[in-house]
Image (spheres, rainbow, N blue to C red):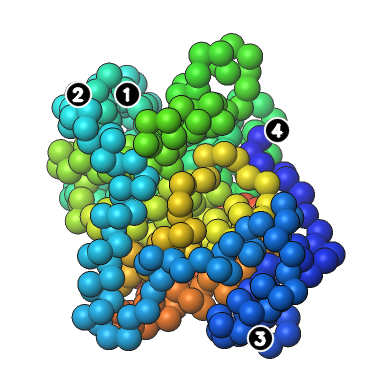
């Protein structure tokens, strides 16, 4: 299981309290960074517990959003996007060369309302990823595509197409509405559900043999030694899946959405930020601030990107998606992505969208639950922009 079950640490002392959260409690959404920094240096001890909050408060982020005009917004995106791709490790991946996709179909199964195919493609030399393609039965025209990267689970893509291997998995999929690809095809879209690196068949052999749920820690450490990141590799794979989708005549590759939960939400947000071919982004149980989520609460190693908080906060990464439609799904009781920080991040992202002239295209849905997927607003949102 994912660190989804990690307990949100109780904060009892000012020195371990997020400085921004402190500002919210005292003065609402306070923006006075100078006053906040003075408070930090005079009252907050720099310790192992306050480490992230002190450094976050002192950091001068190189791509902090300061634009006040649409022209400045465009320039900010032009400068920021290639730098984000660089820190994710795209340059190191590209040095290995762009390989042929070499698609191979492994199977096909027909259901009452859809067809499920299993394929593999090569995403970089010598490396294949498996994925499901779900096709609505009876389609006569190319259909929009929904990419559905999964989060932390041993079975990977299976959960997102509604396949479970035991009663525990069945309950988790049902209660958490995690059959995201199945939902997409049931409302008429083509869905692609890939295995993400570090899970299912893409775990290390030792982890498969020992029945470990994931290989993220080792794979992340290995990636870092070569200037890569696991997030970057997963986002790269999404881009190659889009390349593959563009070769199929049953997919409208001009209408592509991406949505996934938790770790799948991470991939959804970063993939849309890096690849403008994605037209709608719906990250589930992820959108927040780096400071108050992965910076303050125990999370899987795969969440971390070297130097990211010297560059941008999460809402600024998400700002690279503007003016394309964006819907964040958050749980009111999510203990590892706190709701107050999600609200704050949304407020800041909405400001970016307003400058981009697309304020109404940025939305936050808060579900009455914890760390899970919330399908209620998703498909009406997609339908609105894909004209369904």
Locate residue 270, reporting x and y percent. 39, 53
Q: Which mark is residue 28?
A: 3
Numbered disc 2: secondary structure: loop
Quote the CA–CA distance across marks 4 and 2: 36 Å
Name the one closer to the observer, 254 or 297. Answer: 297
Residue on which disc 4 sits = 168
Query: Do residues under tags 2 and 1 come within 8 Å of each other at their CB atoms?
Result: yes
Locate residue 87, reporting x and y percent. 36, 48
Residue on which disc 1 sits = 128
Q: Residue drawn at (70%, 33%), measured in percent from left and top?
A: 168
Quote the CA–CA distance across marks 3 and 1: 49 Å
Quote the CA–CA distance across marks 4 and 3: 42 Å
**Disc on the earlier residue, 3 or 1:** 3
Closer to viewer: mark 1 or mark 4: 1
Q: Which mark is residue 100?
A: none
Is 186 drawn above or below residue 289 in the view shown? Answer: above
Numbered disc 4: secondary structure: helix
Q: Is residue 250 visible?
A: no
**Disc on the earlier residue, 1 or 4:** 1
Q: Is residue 64 left or right of residue 155?
A: left
Name the one closer to the observer, 24 or 182. Answer: 24
Q: Is residue 120 left or right of residue 249?
A: right
Numbered disc 1: secondary structure: strand
**Disc on the earlier residue, 2 or 1:** 2
Residue on which disc 2 sits = 102
Can you tell which quarter of the image residue 54 is in?
A: bottom right
Q: Is residue 186 left or right of residue 221?
A: left
The quadrant of the image that shows the N terminus is top right
Can you tell which quarter of the image residue 138 is in?
A: top left
Locate residue 178, reporting x and y percent. 56, 45
The quadrant of the image that shows the C terminus is bottom left
């Amino acid at each position: 299981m994912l660190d989804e079950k990690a307990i949100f640490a109780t904060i009892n002392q000012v020195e371990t309290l997020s400085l921004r959260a402190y500002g919210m409690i005292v003065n609402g959404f306070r923006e006075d960074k100078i006053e906040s920094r003075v408070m930090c240096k005079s009252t907050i001890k720099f310790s192992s517990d306050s480490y992230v909050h002190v450094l976050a408060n002192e950091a001068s982020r190189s791509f902090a959003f300061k634009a006040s005009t649409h022209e400045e917004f465009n320039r900010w995106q032009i400068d920021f996007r290639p730098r984000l791709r660089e820190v994710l490790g795209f340059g190191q991946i590209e040095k290995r060369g762009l390989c042929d996709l070499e698609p191979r179909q492994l199977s096909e199964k027909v259901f009452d309302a859809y067809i499920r195919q299993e394929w593999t493609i090569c995403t970089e030399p010598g490396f294949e990823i498996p994925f499901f393609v779900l096709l609505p039965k009876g389609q006569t025209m190319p259909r929009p595509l929904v990419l559905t990267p999964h989060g932390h689970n041993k079975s990977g893509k299976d959960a997102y197409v509604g396949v479970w291997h035991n009663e525990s998995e069945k309950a988790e999929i049902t209660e958490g509405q995690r059959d995201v690809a199945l939902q997409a095809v049931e409302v008429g879209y083509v869905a692609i559900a890939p295995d993400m690196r570090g899970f299912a068949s893409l775990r290390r052999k030792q982890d498969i043999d020992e029945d470990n749920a994931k290989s993220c820690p080792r794979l992340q450490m290995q990636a870092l030694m070569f200037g890569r990141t696991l997030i970057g590799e997963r986002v790269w794979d999404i881009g190659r899946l889009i390349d593959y989708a563009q070769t199929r005549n049953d997919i409208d590759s001009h209408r592509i959405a991406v949505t996934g939960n938790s770790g799948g939400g991470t991939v959804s947000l970063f993939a849309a930020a890096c690849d403008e071919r994605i037209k709608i982004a719906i990250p589930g149980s992820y959108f927040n601030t780096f400071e108050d989520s992965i910076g303050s609460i125990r999370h899987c190693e795969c969440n971390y990107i070297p130097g990211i908080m010297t560059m941008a906060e999460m809402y600024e990464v998400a700002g690279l998606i503007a003016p394309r439609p964006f819907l964040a799904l958050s749980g009111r009781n999510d203990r590892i992505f706190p709701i107050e920080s999600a609200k704050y991040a949304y407020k800041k992202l909405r400001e970016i969208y307003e400058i981009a002239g697309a304020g109404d295209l940025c939305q936050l849905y808060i579900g009455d639950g914890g760390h899970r997927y919330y399908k209620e607003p998703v498909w009406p949102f997609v339908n609105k922009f894909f004209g369904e």
